[in-house]
Image (spheres, rainbow, N blue to C red):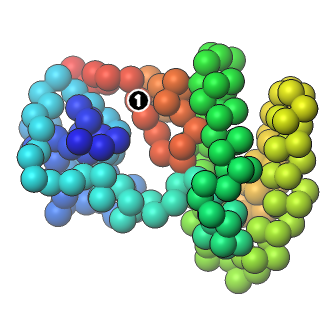
């Protein structure tokens, strides 16, 4: 079924042809309102034959700005050891601790905004090289040395630098955010967030 199993993104009530383009929300004919692909409710019915995962990819081709920097701009393979290490750190450390929920939530909320800004930046290659050398590689090194607090602090510095560079002011608050699935560049919420 894909990443939207039992979520609005794979529900028959979501209309893939009726979207609020500025918000990436789709019309639900059950509630007569617009919802994101990662919302969910008790009226979920599987939409057989429709792949709503493709809707997300179309709306947000890469919500992960680290992947955008390394893969899309610098042509690094998606399975490169740096990305694998960062993903393992996310899965085995950050997603296991509630104290890291705000870091993961911010990444998921503003990650697609940052990724889009980087892709459209005329200086994307130089910017990506700078962030790789000054942030991503040091973070990888800190994780390898098990200096997790230093890696997290360096990551927060990187995020703040990018937010300032692109004048991103939105916060990273999501109701019923599921941090155990966080850090992918798109938001997962806990099941049943609407009555």
Question: Does any portion of residue 3 appear in the rendered image?
Answer: yes
Which residue occupies 43% across, 34% down?
Answer: 188
Q: Is residue 159 above or below residue 191?
A: below
Which residue occupies 46% across, 63% down?
Answer: 61
Q: Is residue 44 above or below residue 76?
A: above
Q: Nearer the viewer, residue 94 or 32?
A: 94
Question: How many circles with numbers are drawn on the protein?
Answer: 1
Q: Is residue 43 left or right of residue 96?
A: left
Which residue occupies 30% across, 52% down?
Answer: 53
Q: Is residue 34 above or below residue 16?
A: above
Q: x%, y% of residue 125?
A: 75, 77
Q: Quadrant of residue 152?
A: top right
**Circle 1 SS class:** loop
Which residue occupies 47% across, 25% down?
Answer: 178
- Residue denoted by label 1: 189
Question: Does any portion of residue 154 appear in the rendered image?
Answer: no
Q: x%, y% of residue 180?
A: 52, 24
| Location of the C terminus (image quadrant) | top left
Q: x%, y% of residue 159?
A: 76, 48
Mark 1: few, some, or many residues within 10 Å (few <14, many ≥20)?
some
Q: Nearer the viewer, residue 159 or 6?
A: 6
Q: Is residue 132 left or right of residue 38?
A: right
| Location of the N terminus (image quadrant) | top left
């Amino acid at each position: 079924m894909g990443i939207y199993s039992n979520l609005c993104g794979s529900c028959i009530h979501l209309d893939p042809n009726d979207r609020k383009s500025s918000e990436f929300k789709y019309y639900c004919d059950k509630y007569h309102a617009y919802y994101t692909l990662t919302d969910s409710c008790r009226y979920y019915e599987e939409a057989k034959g429709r792949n709503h995962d493709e809707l997300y990819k179309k709306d947000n081709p890469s919500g992960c700005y680290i992947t955008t920097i390394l893969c899309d701009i610098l042509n690094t393979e998606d399975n490169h050891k740096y990305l694998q290490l960062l993903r393992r750190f996310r899965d085995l450390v950050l997603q296991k601790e509630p104290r890291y929920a705000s870091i993961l939530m911010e990444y998921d909320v503003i990650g697609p905004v940052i990724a889009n800004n980087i892709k459209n930046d005329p200086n994307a290659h130089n910017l990506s090289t700078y962030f790789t050398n000054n942030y991503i590689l040091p973070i990888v090194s800190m994780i390898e040395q098990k200096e997790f607090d230093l890696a997290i602090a360096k990551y927060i510095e990187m995020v703040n630098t990018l937010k300032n560079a692109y004048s991103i002011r939105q916060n990273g608050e999501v109701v019923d955010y599921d941090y155990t699935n966080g850090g992918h560049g798109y938001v997962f919420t806990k099941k049943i967030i609407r009555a």
